[in-house]
Amino acid sequence: MFRNILKSKKLLFIIVPIFVFAGFACSSDSADSDKDALTFGMILVGPRDDRGWSQAHFEGGQYIEEKLGATMITIDKVNPADSPNVTVPQIVDDMIDQGAQLIFATSDDMKDGILEAAANHPDVPMIWSSGDSAWTEGKDYRSDLKNLGNVMGQMEYGKMIAGCAAALQSDTGKISFLGPLINDETRRLVNSAYLGAKHCWTEIAGKDASSLSFEVVWIGFWFQIPGVTLDPTQVVNEFFDSGSDVVISGIDTPEAIVRAEQIAAGGETVWAVPYDYENACDLGESVCLGVPFFNWGPSYLEIAKSVNDDDFEATWTWAAPNWDDLEDTDDGAIGFKKGAGLTDDNAKHLDKFISSLEDNDINLWTGPLNYQDGSVFLKDGEEASDLQIWYTSTLLEGIDGASSAD
Amino acid sequence: MNSIRKIFTSNMSVMSTLCAVAISLLLAILLLWFSGAPPIETGKLLLEGSLGNATRLSDTSMVWVPLALASASLIITFAAGLWNIGVEGQIIVGAIFASFVAREFDAPPPLLWGAMIMAGGFGGMFWGGLTGLLRIKGKVNEIFGGLGLTFVATGLVIYLVIGPWKRAGIASTSGTAPFDTKAWFPTIMELRISPLAIFLALAGLWLVYYLLKQSKFGLQLRATGINATAASRLGVRTERNLMLAFLLGGILAGIAGTVQVGAIHHKLVPSISGGYGYLAILVVLLGNYKSFRSGLISFFFAMIAVGSIQWQLRLDLHSSLGGVTQGILVLVTLIVVAIFSQIKRNKRIKDAS
Amino acid sequence: MTLDVDKISKHFGNVYANNNVSLSIDSGEIHGLLGENGAGKSTLVKILSGFFEKEAGEIRLNDQLLDLSSPKDSIKCGIGILHQEPMVFLPFSVLDNFLIGSTDQFFAPRKEALKQFQEICNKFDFELDPDTPVSLLTIGQRQQLEIARLLWLDPKVLIFDEPTNAISPAQREKLFATIQQLSTEGMLVIFVSHKLEEVAAICDSVTVLRKGKVAGSKKLPCPQSELIELMFGKLFPSKEIKDIQKGGIQLTASNLKSIEGRESIEITNFEIRKSEIVGIAGIEGAGQRTFLRTIAGRNSAESGTIISGRNLLNGTDYHQRLEKGLYYMPADRLGEGLISELTITEHIALVENKKKNQIIDWEMCYLRAAELIAQFQIQGTPESKAESLSGGNQQRLMFALMPTDADTILLEHPTRGLDIESADWIWNQLLDMRSDDCSIIFSSSDFEELLSYSDRIIVCFAGRIVGEFERNEFNPEHIALLMSGSQI
């Protein structure tokens, strides 16, 4: 049979035209889609089902679809390791070709790409989540990009609660933080977790500050890239081996809770606080102290509505939680879901801590606070400004770990 | 591995190579069908997504450039009978050297581009030369030497990205800050296509074609590749030729790295080589060690890489299907080509008897 | 039991690898099959093992005609062959290798097999652990494994094909003991070798092959020089060549020490004059190959001096010597002489206009190739690949590629495996070169060739020159004796 194929060069003249025809036939029906309903693009850095950062965004997009009857175009694993020959501007072009009227670029890692794409398509509204390009007071304000807005939840609160839960439950007083890469965002979140932990360790548990240790290890990227970053599972092992009994995760993916569950199954008493995705505790319910999660849906819906109503404005939004119900998915940009691992007592303490945050009874970003090198960050009684919090240049005194690359 | 080589050196005609690729594409699409992708739609989207308009054509071309250059590099070393697995590392080091120029020097853009290309080529040559030294002086097989040096190059690029070349206040393996736009290779209008990069790829393929066909060096290289002992007896300085092959292959790979930073990423990222060094091995095998064919097949792979984005965007297929398709394609093509050459061999035996 | 090989023929191109080969072997004897490389031993072994199909003749075991058209047939007929380097599957264990190919059942009866394996090992005193991966075994141990495997198949005939090439002396002793034990038990054993002393040591009788034919059979023991005569052919020259005036000294080698592979040489003094032809006689492995290759620079000397004309060649490599006029033509024409997949034109381009243009003028090379094809009477076209040429034409091509300024020609077995016409043509070429002041050194395993064309013959044994004869004092019997290591 193959010989006949080989002999008849005709075959080639059949195959090639099929594809060429197919190519031209389909070029006519692009950029169709329903004019009434919104079409938007969602660019994810990791897999859409990562039980972490990317899934939270994906479900945020589904929330828009559901509430607005909009259509989402998704592409995931957009990072140079997984998709080396795909760039953000390229994807944005494709999405716009396909009719997208709004683009979400949902990773810090997409900064350069989305800035370029926004400049290429000044008429298409875009959102760079977690960024600061639209913050008029911010360091990297891009006044030229009138179509690029930013959204970020006030995860500082989520991390404070996470830190508090960790400190309340920890026996050893050795808390570990599984950090991704080092930048303004991650420093600020580690600092927040530390502040929450320190407060609850000393004020609620009534223990001595000096008996609390708080260590961060950075893997080098938002998630593991084999051969490039550290292996988060290994890092978690080392945390527990060195006597730590709680790991707070700061990376996009749920290795910390998965590994903690396995170690606990081996008889050890360890806990974990996952991150990003509201149902992350499902991966290890018994060891989960709770999860601070992003609830992108409501904020994204607002933006989508504004695009639909033609009154999109590129703003920088640092959206607050819904203090009334931290598990409410229809309101609030971040939330916290307590985990089954938290003891009832600690859960009560944690609720108290949450309500004092809500009532503004306490502001943990209040001096005296020192930087890691001992220099003064906030004088006694001084409260940090948004700028000071967003752009914290180093970790705080009391945290072990690198503040920037050595 | 020699047997693989044997299969593919059995004088496949252009027609049978194309047939093999076409058949395997059909089979690949059929296989995708089983995983839930409508076959006609996937084929259509692949074509449309890679060639459908000027933007996509230009994106496809820009994926083609580094792949074609890496293939050119491998054709040279394959001709010398070397399994130069280290091309990946040479691309990385080329990218590092080019990035160094882009970051540290200020010059009028054309000069800067020229300097980046030279530096990148030099970097790749340096790394290729090391593999060559290990092979020739140290008797370390180039497969292991190349893998080892690729490992070192990866370590180096991570170190640079997270260390000395990090963005201010940031320690992330995501990449360096973008270069000054002066160091970006020029593009046509709004498109991302860089004529300079295209030129480099065409020049690289042509150079390799010309060297192997027309030059004494190319002939000596082929002779060395087939039988180094006999080549040496006939007066060929085989070690020098092997070294030159490593150096030249390194230059081409280094330029591929330069294009990656200068025309595509505009910054240095840890995965700057994009796996092109490994993919190119398959391209060159399928291309029967010929420049023109490898160039075409590179383009075909670039089409899959760029076009398969549409599968995810339009059909919501899983993101890994593009890679899976490439894998299936390579596998099936290898099988089909092997069958073809077996048929040919049988026929030859039959004719002989 | 008797194995009869009756008038077997097989040819490749226009050369007979086996030409009317007959032999008859009884069980209980160890029969040697002796001959220099290329004499036709491997062809016969491959016919017996079913790899090659014979063109004529019959093979009978106990008067029963055997049909050996595939290796499987051969095993079925009770012929077992121990190859030079046993074919084994490296990552697998000894026992797995033992089982491979030995049963038609898909799941081999391991327990049973293990028992029998151990019985065989005990019987022959093989120390083999059934669970060791074969990759950890020495070649000698792999041989033992292979012997055990062959014995398990219960053969009637066992052929040992050059079994001592890669094993240590101790392992060789062991192997010989095993062979003798097998023979005593009634096994019909054929011992194939080019090594005279081994055949003499172990065999009861021997058949000598030469140029594809049976040169003769002997009962052993017999004087080794008689075997050499059979191996090296007629003890008189077939041609009388004209003696011509010799020139001055062309090349001197003194105190030369060199090792290549298993062959080492120690040559105190060697000289050759212009227009002189020196033939080197010696059985395979006596040092003639290393000597030629050391002078050519293919192999570097450990010590000693080589002077060519006025040039001291010490410290120069092969390529520099090539430029100084030394040209080496190896016996292995496709292994080292030519590049199998390149065409004649490409070979021409490879050696033509050495330092000049880096760009090849293919048209010119094509025409040049056509010219040389005519001049050297090569059967082929400029587009013919070297591998498609017959041996004689390959040799002609090697002559065609010789630099015109070569003044010292070093040849290994210049006419081995060639038809008579090619052989004559080649010697005519060489004699012409001699007339042009060239010095020629060649090794040969053909007395007729040595005696016909040499102005002088040197005899190598165990890496040394043990005899030297000017043309007027050629004494073939002496030469044969010296080759066998005897003193005169």
Image (cartoon, rainbow, N blue to C red):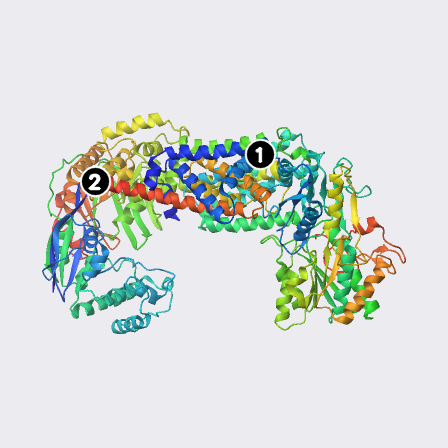
For residue A29, the mark is: 1
Q: Quadrant of residue B55?
A: top right
- The residue tagged with tag 1: helix, strand or loop? helix
Report whether B292 appears left or right of A67.
Answer: left
> Mark 1 is on which residue type?
Asp
Residue C304 x %, y %: 33, 48
Residue A290 visible in the displayed image: yes
Vertical comparison of C371 with B80: above or below: above
The three-letter code of the residue at mark 2 reads Ile
Total marks placed: 2
Q: Quadrant of residue C407?
A: top left
Output the chain of dot 1: A
**Cα–Cα gap, marks 1 and 2:** 86 Å
* Residue at the spot 48% in from the left edge and 39% down from the top edge: B71
- Disc 2 sits on a residue from what chain? C
Q: Residues within 10 Å of mark 2 (few under 14, many from 20)?
A: many
Q: Is residue A6 above or below residue B158?
A: above
Q: Secondary structure at mark 2?
A: strand
Q: Position of residue A204 (x, y in %)?
A: 82, 68
C38 lies above or below A286: above
In the rendering, which numbered label is found on residue A209? none
- Dot in front, 1 or 2: 1
Residue designated by label 2:
C277
* Quadrant occupied by the N terminus of chain A: top left
Left/right placement of residue C277 relative to residue A386 reads left
